[in-house]
Amino acid sequence: MEDFKRWMTAESGASLPKMQIGKMMRNREMGQYRKQPSRQEPFISNKWSNFTPSRKANLANRFFPNRDETTRVTSVALLRCFHLPNERLFTLSQDNILRFHMRQKSQRYRLLNSYNAPSRYRIITDITRSTKGDHLAYTTLDSYLYYFHVNRINEPMRWNLFHLVQPNAFSWNICSNVSFNMEDNYLFVVESGGQLGVIRIDIPRHHRFSFNAHRKDILAVGSSKCNPGIFYTAASDGLWKVWDNRSSRNVYPVQLSFTPSYNIAHIDSDSQDKYIVTTSCCGTRIDVWDLRFPANEPFENYQQQNVREAISILSSGHISIKTGRRRDEEEFFLRAKFSPQITGHRYIYVTSSIGYLYIFDIVTGEVRSFHQQGTLIYNSSWHPDNSEISCVTLSGAIITYYHREE
């Protein structure tokens, strides 16, 4: 746990001496930066400027969101959102309408265009973007996978359609998760019965195969952000596994861990394949795992209890996050993720079933919550280049949290 905090402190620039932004810029322009002899500051070459990634993160983390702006979009619930290149934001509504928005100077989002999904009368179970942001893929309740280029969204006849393994009479699992690998040449999609589909999409005739990754239904799939061959799966048997796509037909995992008391619903990784963060099913538990040291127990745990707001360090090495919620409010977390690389992955952010956005500061242990009266935040996305978090609500609005000087 201490190694994790030391690493995040160095990566996020929190270990650097406090310095005014003007002085940092002046030192950079005059070439006066020298590498400090500190074991906590990892050496990463930066041939473009004298600002190391940790210095960039130090600057970015000074502009933590402190304002919000609401944009009304539709009268139905917005279920998913994520940022795209060129200051665009994608949203998916409950009526299967795909919308693209453009960010304005006022931090509001203006609707660019909207499209009815070809599967309008099918329930979309999961949707994701490629690493480059030029492709989208989504799965439906009746076991179909749609994959298409963003520029061809108004040409459904040119979309790629795959029929997945359907649930049988003894399986209740649906094809509910899909993920691109880092180089956007493979799609990993959850199928029924513990099967995982692997589709190669960078060749004209898409090569596709499936293998039995778990004995029980798979609940989550995720991909590495620095290695195109690594991906992760978690199933209802309490196991989560690390796979290498370069191995023979993916028959054997390269790493395996066990969570006997709960199941994992979502997996996210940092940009250097050192740590992953997992979200439990129907609970308020978030765990951080060190991929370099396989273990059956996470070394970091963020868990919510119905007591006053506090943070306590337990003797077992776990950290428990406690916020003031009434006992009659049943809450569970949805899709916990690391903050972008520009922040040094200093934060873990997650939305909850009662409409809150929580941000956990790994370095200081502070917990911040965002909420607007009368709204239920359902999904969120942290801008990869700015201190901005966009959230979608069940009332059909986009809430943007951003920084503005007092």
Image (tube, grey):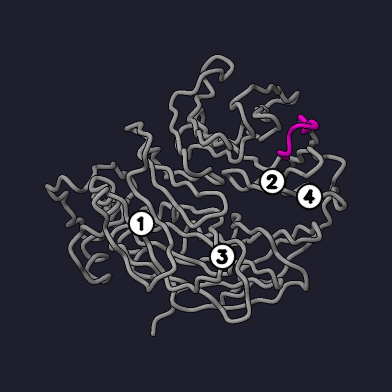
Q: Earlier in the sequence, mark 3 or mark 4?
A: 4
Task: Confirm whether the magenta stretch covers residue 397.
Answer: no
The Cα atoms of the two marked residues, 4 and 1, are separated by 35 Å
Q: Nearer the viewer, residue 198 or 307?
A: 307
Q: Amino acid at mark 2?
A: Leu
Which residue is under mark 3? 330
Q: Are marks 3 and 4 in contact (CB under 8 Å)?
A: no
**150 left or right of 371?**
right
Q: Secondary structure at mark 3?
A: loop
Q: Are marks 2 and 4 in contact (CB under 8 Å)?
A: yes
Mark 2 crowd level (few <14, some 14–19, many ≥20, 10 Å Cα): some
The Cα atoms of the two marked residues, 2 and 4, are separated by 9 Å
Above/below status of 317 relative to 402:
above
Q: Are marks 4 and 1 in contact (CB under 8 Å)?
A: no
Quarter containing the C terminus? bottom left
Which residue is under mark 4? 153
The Cα atoms of the two marked residues, 1 and 3, are separated by 28 Å
Which numbered circle lies on residue 346? 1
Q: Amino acid at mark 3?
A: Glu
Mark 1 crowd level (few <14, some 14–19, many ≥20, 10 Å Cα): many
Above/below status of 234 relative to 279:
above
Which residue is under mark 2? 136
The Cα atoms of the two marked residues, 3 and 2, are separated by 33 Å
Q: Secondary structure at mark 1?
A: loop
Q: Which residues are magenta?
A: 165-174
Foreground tag (1 vs 3): 3
Task: Confirm whether the magenta stretch covers residue 166.
Answer: yes
